[in-house]
Image (cartoon, helix red, strand yellow):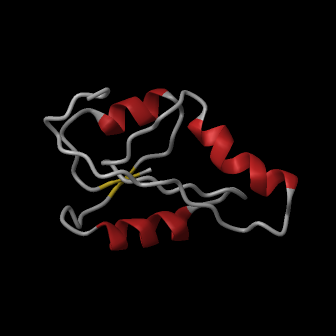
Amino acid sequence: MVDGGSTDGTSEVARSFGAQVIEGGYRDNSEPRRAIGLLQAKNEIIYHIESDVFLSTHNWLREMIEPSVKNHDIVATRSLRYKYRRDDYLLN
């Protein structure tokens, strides 16, 4: 995980699950952080997620990765992105 200076405990949570955390700058620009992460990645599957993405189910990661594991012709997937306002409630 590449952290661009979060202050909400994101890095600590990631470490508690065994993630390697790379402290990176570029707080206002996610593109350099994404590149840093890609260069440092050592596994077969790389998943990029922005901090403003709403995870709709508890098994979202499995749903994103499973198609490419079953069909090696699939080399990339993308989750749907929903616009929301921070003051919105989950079900309104």
Given the current orientation, which residue lies at the most extreme front position? Answer: 92
For the C terminus, the quadrant is: top left
Residue drawn at x 18%, y 65% as measured from the top left: 28
In the figure, is residue 15 to the left or right of 12?
right
Where is residue 23 shown, x and y percent of the image?
Answer: 32, 54
In the figure, is residue 78 to the left or right of 31?
right
Q: On the image, which quarter does residue 29 sit in?
A: bottom left
Residue drawn at x 54%, y 33% as measured from the top left: 18
Residue drawn at x 24%, y 63% as measured from the top left: 25
Where is residue 20 shown, x and y percent of the image?
Answer: 49, 45
State the count of labels: 0
Where is residue 47 shown, x and y percent of the image?
Answer: 56, 55
Residue drawn at x 81%, y 52% as measured from the top left: 69
Given the current orientation, which residue lies at the most extreme left position? Answer: 87
16 vs 25: above or below: above
Q: Nearer the viewer, residue 82 or 29?
A: 82
Q: Nearer the viewer, residue 74 or 22?
A: 74
In the figure, is residue 27 to the left or right of 31?
left
67 vs 75: above or below: above
Q: Nearer the viewer, residue 77 or 16?
A: 77
51 vs 36: above or below: above
Where is residue 41 shown, x and y percent of the image?
Answer: 58, 61
Q: On the image, which quarter does residue 89 sit in?
A: top left
Q: On the image, which quarter does residue 16 sit in?
A: top left
